[in-house]
Image (cartoon, grey):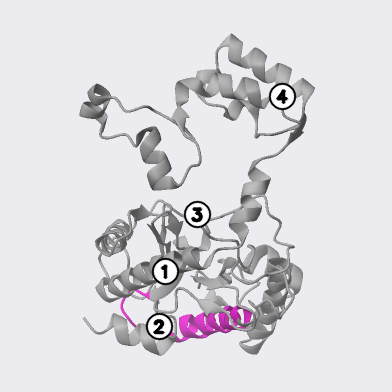
């Protein structure tokens, strides 16, 4: 590792630096050097048979001068270049037992924050206030920050998957969809829950919510190595489940309409040190033990007379974080209520 050297004057203003010895002690680096030595190290590295490197424009600014550019250009012409990030992402795809423990804590913190936020919600508060409440609860329980800008979407705002304005008043009779999660020791959680602002689902909200919940639970059961499925396979199953569940409540929707309008996103993604972790890894990979994925089916019924009128304007998503097991999945976010009876009891227990 190449790091800034210890410097009392700089540290007086900007805080302590780890330094080369600290890097070896705290982070387990086999070798550590002052970053001013990186040029000479790179020159020597270019004599190797292969060079594992990402885009040259990703190099630090110390190589932005003409010498650095010439060095890189010469090296790239001479060597067999192999991507570095792909190797790192393959390592990140399967979590160690220690990483799983960190992610359990991350999920527990965020789940408890959702509990407190559900209990706190009432008509007249704004989406911005609910955002503040959830972030406060995450931070007070040990999260360093929210893992991403949350979606706090009340009423028809939930029809936009990535609505992040979060500035509207929450009204009586609406649902609020919240997609958020804290970060703990670098590991993200990513939860979505949808609940009634006044604490009680209307009958159409209840029916549509139960559809999404049934699909969520059915897909979680598929998250095992024994299933021999990929995330793409789980998504295909989720579409079949969703179509059947909707038919049960009177939707005559075909698959094309379902996937392009009512349920237009993928059922999940990999999760870890980033929210959409290992982004270069295809979701066609078979699920293997200690992968961590999200399962997040959703329904978004637009104001369109192709669909039953009493469901129009309702958006619902339910997202959990799941560790792939050999034969049983482990849900990291199980403490965030999602059954209708639990949500209504919590939201009315002020």
Q: Is residue 225 magenta?
A: no
Per the model, the C-alpha gap separating discs 2 and 1 is 26 Å
Q: Which residue is mark 4?
A: 47
Q: Earlier in the sequence, mark 2 or mark 4?
A: 4
Does residue 230 appear in the picture of this structure?
yes
Task: Find residue 162 and name its label.
Answer: none
Task: Find residue 273 and name its label.
Answer: 3
Residue at position x 39%, y 79% in the image: 335
- Secondary structure, magenta segment, majority class: helix
Per the model, the C-alpha gap separating discs 4 and 3 is 33 Å
Q: Is residue 137 left or right of residue 63?
A: left
Disc 1 + disc 4, Cβ < 8 Å: no
The nearer-to-camera label among 2 and 1 is 1
Per the model, the C-alpha gap separating discs 1 and 4 is 46 Å
Question: Which secondary structure, mark 2?
Answer: loop
Q: Quadrant of residue 221?
A: bottom right
Disc 3 + disc 2, Cβ < 8 Å: no
Position of residue 304 measured from the top left corner of the image (x, y, whole percent): 60, 67
The region drawn magenta spans: 196-220
The nearer-to-camera label among 4 and 3 is 4
Q: Which residue is mark 1?
A: 107
Q: Which residue is mark 2?
A: 201
Question: Which secondary structure, mark 3?
Answer: loop
The nearer-to-camera label among 2 and 4 is 4
Q: Foreground: 337 or 165? A: 337
Residue at position x 43%, y 70% in the image: 104
């Amino acid at each position: 590792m190449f790091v800034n050297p210890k410097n009392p004057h700089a540290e007086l203003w900007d805080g302590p630096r780890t330094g080369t010895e600290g890097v070896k002690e705290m982070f387990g680096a086999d070798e550590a050097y002052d970053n001013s030595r990186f040029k000479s190290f790179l020159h020597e590295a270019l004599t190797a048979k292969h060079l594992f490197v990402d885009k040259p424009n990703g190099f630090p600014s110390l190589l932005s001068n003409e010498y650095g550019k010439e060095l890189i250009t010469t090296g790239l012409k001479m060597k067999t270049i192999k991507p570095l990030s792909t190797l790192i992402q393959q390592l990140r795809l399967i979590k160690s037992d220690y990483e799983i423990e960190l992610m359990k804590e991350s999920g527990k913190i965020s789940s408890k924050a959702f509990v407190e936020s559900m209990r706190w919600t009432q008509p007249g508060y704004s989406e911005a206030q609910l955002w503040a409440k959830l972030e406060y609860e995450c931070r007070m329980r040990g999260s360093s920050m929210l893992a991403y800008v949350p979606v706090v979407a009340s009423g028809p705002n939930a029809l936009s998957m990535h609505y992040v304005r979060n500035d509207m008043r929450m009204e009586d009779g609406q649902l609020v969809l919240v997609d958020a999660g804290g970060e703990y020791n670098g590991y993200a959680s990513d939860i979505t829950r949808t609940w009634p602002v006044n604490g009680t689902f209307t009958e159409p909200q209840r029916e549509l919510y139960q559809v999404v919940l049934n699909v969520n639970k059915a897909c979680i059961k598929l998250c095992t190595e024994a299933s021999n499925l990929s995330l793409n396979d789980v998504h295909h199953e989720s579409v079949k489940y969703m179509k059947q569940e909707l038919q049960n409540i009177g939707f005559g929707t075909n698959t094309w309409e379902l996937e392009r309008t009512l349920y237009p996103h993928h059922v999940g993604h990999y999760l870890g040190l980033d929210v959409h972790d290992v982004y270069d890894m295809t979701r066609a990979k078979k699920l293997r033990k200690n992968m961590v994925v999200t399962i997040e089916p959703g329904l978004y019924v637009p104001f369109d007379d192709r669909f039953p009128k009493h469901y129009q304007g309702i958006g619902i998503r339910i997202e959990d974080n799941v560790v792939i097991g050999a034969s049983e999945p482990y849900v990291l976010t199980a403490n965030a209520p999602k059954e209708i009876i639990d949500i209504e009891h919590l939201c009315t227990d002020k």
